[in-house]
Image: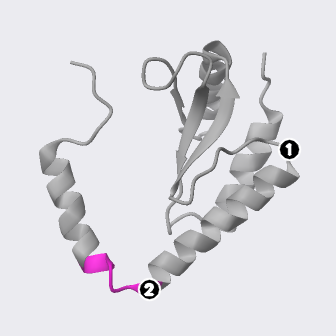
Amino acid sequence: MYSTHLSPMQTYLVSENLKKMVSEDWRREKLHSNIAYFKTKMKNANRTVMPSGSAIQPIWIGDEKVALSVSEQLKQKGIWLTAIRYPTVAKGAARLRLTLTTDHTHDDIDFLVKSLVECTYD
């Protein structure tokens, strides 16, 4: 069976953890700060990030083979960014899916953006 969602057990555990964390404002502030920092760094590097206000930041690639290639190049650098492609998204709309967290530092984000710039897109 093809699926890209969490299992019911994972969903339950996530919701229980979210109940605990919802009162911790610093987490929300740090996450929003990381999202804004990432978007700014990507814009300055002339890389396309699709619109998203959430922790999930889709990086536009387009071609499926290129998305797989970039994903593999990043893995070689120690970065796990999954290539999302058809049938999860429309043909020709492949992307990388990044999830930012409060554990990411600006140095982590800088390394990611630098690594993306170094990838070959062919």
Q: Which residue is mark 1?
A: 46
Give the x, y percent position of residue 19.
Answer: 23, 75
Residue 15 in picture, x, y percent from top left? 21, 64
Image position, residue 76 (x, y; %): 63, 30
- Residue 53 visible in the displayed image: yes
Which image quarter: residue 93? top right
Which residue is label 2 attached to? 25
Total numbered labels placed on residues in the image: 2
Dot 2: what SS?
helix
Q: Residue at x 58, y 53 (%)?
A: 52
Picture colour scheme: one colour
- x and y percentages locating residue 106 in the rendered image: 69, 66
User: Which amino acid, mark 2?
Assistant: Asp
Part of the protein shown in magenta: 20-25
Write the residue at 49% across / 62% down. Answer: 101
Relative side of 80 to 118, left or right: left
Residue in the foreground of this view, choosing between 55 and 119: 55
